[in-house]
Image (tube, helix red, strand yellow):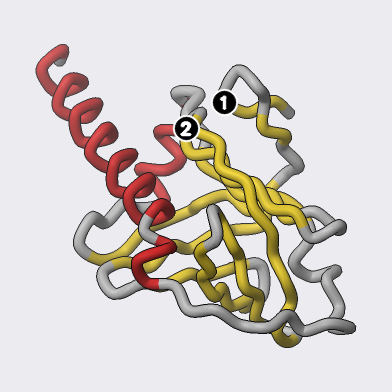
Amino acid sequence: MKESKTKVRVGLLAALTAVSALVLALGLTACGGAGGGDADKTPFVGTWDISSISGEEAVTEDDMKMMSDMGLNAFMNLDEDGTASIDLFGEVMTGTWTVKSATEIDVTIDGSTQAATLDGDKLTMTDKTSTLVFTKGDPKEVSSAGGASK
């Protein structure tokens, strides 16, 4: 049983690395763009939990739930004032976001921009190798100690 749990933890650590690499790769796959100006921010504002990753380093919704149950959270906050923060299991990155249309935004982290598309309660970001799916979640705040507080 211990060997099985160890394998799961090793797999989860690999998944954490993949999530971090994808978000940090925003600059490698990004394209700039102007903001939407007067477009409605309301559907986008709030906390978005990473629910799955598909592609080279796939992570399922069950994997993400298991990590969350272990106290490892991965989410993005989009605030009304246009600021964005991404908390990847305690590693926090900040930036901005702008509305491009009723279903699309640009998220800029460390000067690199990635488009995200809204479909219902799902927000999707895709690069050359992976797709991140975020689901609208309960409000969370990033803490200065790393990790999330509700």
User: Quick one: label 2, few (<14), some, or many (20+) residues within 10 Å?
Assistant: some
SS at mark 1? Answer: loop
Which residue was labeled with disc 2?
89
Q: Quick check: 12 left or right of 107?
A: left
Q: Locate the N terminus and report the quarter of the image it occupies.
A: top left
Provide residue 150's location: percent of width, then percent of height: 74, 29
100 relative to 105, above or below: below
SS at mark 2? Answer: loop
Which residue was labeled with disc 1?
147
| Residue occupying the point 55% across, 60% down | 111
Kind of residue indicated by mark 2: Phe
Q: Quick check: 80 left or right of 115?
A: right
- Judge by depth and name the residue closer to the eye, 76 or 106: 106
Provide residue 84's location: percent of width, then percent of height: 68, 53
In the displayed image of the protein, which residue is found farthest to the left? 3
In the displayed image of the protein, which residue is found farthest to the top? 2
- Judge by depth and name the residue closer to the eye, 69 or 117: 117
Instruction: Say if mark 1 contacts mark 2, CB within 8 Å.
Output: yes
| Residue occupying the point 56% across, 56% down | 109
